[in-house]
Image: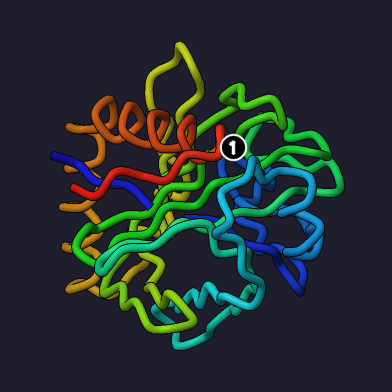
Amino acid sequence: MYKTAGACSHSRAATTRHQGGRNHSARPEEFLPAQEAARRCRRGTGMEKAGFLEVKLRPDGSRQTFRCELVARGTEWVVLRYVTTRAWQVDDLQVQPGTLTYAYFWVDRPYNVYHWVSLEGRTIAYYINLSDAARLEVDRIIWVDLAADVLIRPGTPPQVLDTQELADLPRPLQDRARKALASVLDHWREITEEVEAWTRRLHAGQGPRET
């Protein structure tokens, strides 16, 4: 069975990628502080904590570090959360201010998931990052970005982004990325159904079920 977990609050400009000549970004340029995000979004979970870090490593050796709100965690997964404060775009998807992200990370899966929802909990989209070598520590999740991403909107098939970046990866990473992408495309319905169920529980102030 697929398990879930994750989300964050950025302290620096978002990464912009290109697909079909258009810019898109998985994150907006700024976010509410973790405590404000918790005040606006939390539903009595009692689990909010400021200061948890998402550390994204790139194959070229660069890194980005984002300060997040910790929502829930287990021994091999973590759920983070943030609220966007300005409009931004991913491919042709317009994401409006006030959009809430639940970000799910696992140490034993070749991907992580950003689940974008309205403050009322309506799903806007799922953004699946291909990932390599995720490591969960006391105060951070560290993962390696494998370039390609999968955008899934309700009622539409998966849309693969950044395929050129995948093709530019070194051969060993490219092979792992292609295998991860094939797995995501084979199981995207199970992944999104699982994430949807977890987000509904967390948004309602219920803890996740250990599996």
Way the structure is coloured = rainbow
Residue plotted at (66% across, 72% down)? 50
Front-most of 127 and 206? 206
Q: Residue at (62%, 32%) from the top-left corner?
A: 117
Q: Residues within 10 Å of mark 1 (few under 14, many from 20)?
A: many
Furthest toward the top, the residue is 155
**Above or below 202: residue 14:** below
Q: Position of residue 140 (x, y in %)?
A: 47, 79
Q: From the viewer's perspective, is residue 143 above or below residue 152? A: below
Q: Is residue 122 left or right of residue 79?
A: right
Q: Position of residue 125 (x, y in %)?
A: 54, 30
Residue 38, x across and y down, in percent: 71, 54
On the rendered image, what quadrant is the N terminus found in?
A: top left
Residue 196, image quadrant = top left
Q: Is residue 186 left or right of residue 57?
A: left
**Where is 154 relative to 138, above or below?**
above
User: Helix, strand, or loop for circle 1?
Assistant: strand
Whether residue 30 appears in this view of the structure is: no
The residue closer to the viewer here, 48 or 179, is 48
Which residue is at a point 29% across and 35% down the rendered structure image? 191
Residue depicted at 55% across the width and 59% down the height: 47
Classify residue 174 by image quadrant: bottom left
Q: Which residue is mark 1?
A: 116
- Given residues 78 and 144, the one toward you in this image is 78
What type is the residue that disc 1 sits on? Trp
